[in-house]
Amino acid sequence: MVIDAALVKEQGVSFTVVCVRSGATKNSVEAGKTQAAFSPHFDGVPVVLMKQDSRRRPTYFGRPDIVNFLTRISVDRLPWREWHVN
């Protein structure tokens, strides 16, 4: 499977933002399962899920401190790349 994700290190905190479809965040149980599934592919750093609406406005699900940081920056500033995961 190929996913779009950004591995970020900011102010001494490393985390990964993974772009997902809206179904992956439809409730906290599904979001938690999705985060847990992606975590091993990124060396166990915290995973934040991001979905976008039709206008490309992001909505994040994850650690509150990281989500708060992400809401203050443009999604285009993140170092996106394709990741191949099983």
Image: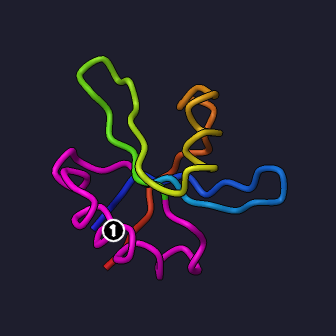
Residue 2 position within the rendered picture, expressed as x and y whole percent measured from the top left? 32, 62
Q: For the residue labelled by badge 1, is the local secondary structure a helix, a strand or a loop?
A: helix
Stretch of the chain drawn in magenta? 19-47
Of residue 33 and residue 82, the one placed in the foreground of this image is 33
Per the image, the residue denoted by label 1 is 32
Could you tell me how many numbered marks the image carries? 1
**Residue beneath the point at 41% across and 50% down:** 61
Residue 37 position within the rendered picture, expressed as x and y whole percent measured from the top left? 34, 76
**Residue beneath the point at 60% across and 72% down:** 45
From the viewer's perspective, is 58 left or right of 71? left
Of residue 65 and residue 86, the one placed in the foreground of this image is 65
**Residue beneath the point at 43% across and 43% down:** 60
**Residue beneath the point at 21% across and 44% down:** 22
Label the magenta part by its dominant secondary structure. helix
Label 1 amino acid? Answer: Gly
Q: Is residue 30 magenta?
A: yes
